[in-house]
């Protein structure tokens, strides 16, 4: 026997609680298609329900609405619902706003990329200068070490020559 979705339970504190489970909402029964259901057939794109008539009549506008970063999904859905009752002038204003937004965002992206490129070039030059300085310092250090070794060898050779002169018979 399965428990009733709206059942009473005793919890660990000894009190009785009642829980009610709401059954899931089922979709409308698919019987005969009516004028309303065929007229409002939809196309699903990225979680948006776009009426087919809108997608066919305004393909560029649906693309702009889907791509805009300034709208939430609820706002997109709102525009798809209201689009059929908008005047041509209102549709053109919406299109103009979305196109302008897209152009401005594209312009900002280009400016950002240019600034980023400038910064990268600047840092690359600084890095190359840093590497060149390190390389010069390493060469100077190696040269100083070599000169010190040569001086030590020279001193040792002079000491040997001096020792040979002292031990040589004098005539």
Image (cartoon, rainbow, N blue to C red):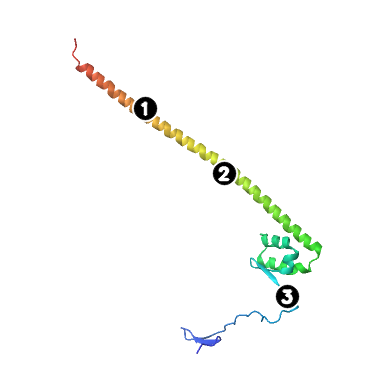
Dot 1 corresponds to which residue?
147
Q: Residue at x 53, y 39 (%)?
A: 126
Q: Residue at x 51, y 36 (%)?
A: 129
Q: Residue at x 45, y 35 (%)?
A: 135
Of callouts 3 and 1, which one flags the residue occurring earlier in the amino acid sequence?
3
Image-based side of 128 in relation to 115, left or right: left
Dot 3 corresponds to which residue?
38
Say above or below: 164 vs 97. above
Q: Where in the figure is residue 32, as x and y percent of width and height?
A: 71, 81
Q: Where in the figure is residue 137, as x and y percent of width and height?
A: 44, 34
Of callouts 3 and 2, which one flags the residue occurring earlier in the amino acid sequence?
3
Q: Nearer the viewer, residue 78 or 59?
A: 59
- Which of label 3 and label 1 is nearer to you? 3
Label 3, label 1: how far apart the Cα atoms are: 94 Å
Say above or below: 147 vs 23. above
Task: Tell me the number on the disc at residue 129.
Answer: none
Check the image and name the residue furthest to the top: 171
Label 2, label 1: how far apart the Cα atoms are: 40 Å
Q: Where in the figure is residue 132, as x and y percent of width and height?
A: 48, 35
Of callouts 2 and 1, which one flags the residue occurring earlier in the amino acid sequence?
2
Say above or below: 12 vs 157. below
Dot 2 corresponds to which residue?
120
Check the image and name the residue furthest to the front: 32
Q: Give the quadrant of residue 51.
A: bottom right
Q: Nearer the viewer, residue 16 or 38?
A: 38
Q: Give the quadrant of residue 78.
A: bottom right
Label 3, label 2: how far apart the Cα atoms are: 56 Å
Q: Where in the figure is residue 139, as x and y percent of width and height?
A: 42, 32
For the C terminus, the quadrant is top left
Disc 3 crowd rating (10 Å Cα; few below 14, some 14-19, many 20+) is few
Image-based side of 1 in relation to 32, left or right: left
Cβ–Cβ under 8 Å for marks 3 and 1 = no
């Amino acid at each position: 026997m399965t428990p009733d979705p709206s059942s009473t339970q005793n919890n660990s504190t000894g009190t009785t609680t009642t829980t009610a489970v709401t059954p899931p909402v089922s979709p409308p029964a698919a019987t005969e298609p009516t004028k309303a259901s065929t007229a409002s057939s939809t196309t699903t794109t990225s979680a948006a329900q776009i009426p087919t008539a809108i997608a066919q009549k305004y393909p560029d506008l649906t693309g702009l609405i889907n791509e805009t970063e300034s709208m939430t999904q609820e706002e997109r859905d709102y525009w798809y619902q209201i689009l059929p009752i908008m005047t041509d002038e209102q549709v053109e204003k919406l299109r103009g706003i979305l196109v302008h937004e897209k152009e401005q965002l594209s312009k900002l992206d280009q400016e950002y990329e240019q600034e980023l490129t400038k910064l990268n070039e600047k840092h690359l030059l600084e890095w190359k200068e840093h590497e060149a300085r390190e390389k010069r310092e390493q060469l100077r250090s190696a040269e100083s070490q070599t000169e010190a070794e040569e001086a030590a060898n020279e001193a040792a050779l002079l000491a040997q020559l001096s020792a040979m002169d002292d031990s040589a018979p004098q005539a």
